[in-house]
Amino acid sequence: MTADGVPGFVPWRIDVDYVDMHITSIRPLITQLDFITDKTHWGAAFRFGQLKIGKDDFNRVARAMGRLSW
């Protein structure tokens, strides 16, 4: 039996490093982010919980959250 209590179930997980940042609104960034292809229905990009974000978009969001260098 696994740690999750379901025999044969092996969850897919990734390692994450958390850093101190502050919460910010996504709305001012929508027009600048390439991974949001439909600017009108921008929330659709986040529906599946995990998505690939390019380096430029990642850095834009990080700067908006107070991370000046990465």
Image (cartoon, rainbow, N blue to C red):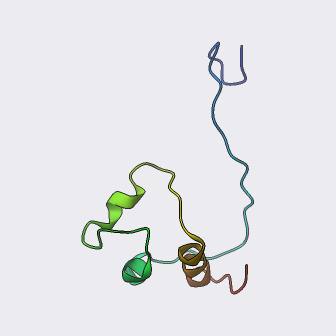
Residue projecting furthest to the bottom: 68
Q: Position of residue 52 (x, y in %)?
A: 53, 59
**Image quarter of residue 65:** bottom right
Give the answer, above or below, for where 15 lies relative to 31: above
Q: Which residue occupies 60% across, 73% down?
A: 55
Going 72% across and 24% down the picture, which residue do you hit? 3
Give the residue drawn at x 71%, y 13%.
1
Relative depth, front residue between 27 and 22: 27
Image spot of residue 29 (x, y percent): 43, 81
Q: Is residue 51 above or below residue 31?
A: above
Q: Quadrant of residue 16?
A: bottom right
Q: On screen, 14 above or below 22?
A: above
Q: Nearer the viewer, residue 47 or 33?
A: 33
**Tally of numbered tags:** 0
Q: Residue at x 38, y 77 (%)?
A: 30
Residue 8 location in percent, x, y?
A: 64, 15
For residue 43, side relative to residue 63 (left or right):
left
In the picture, the quarter occupied by the C terminus is bottom right
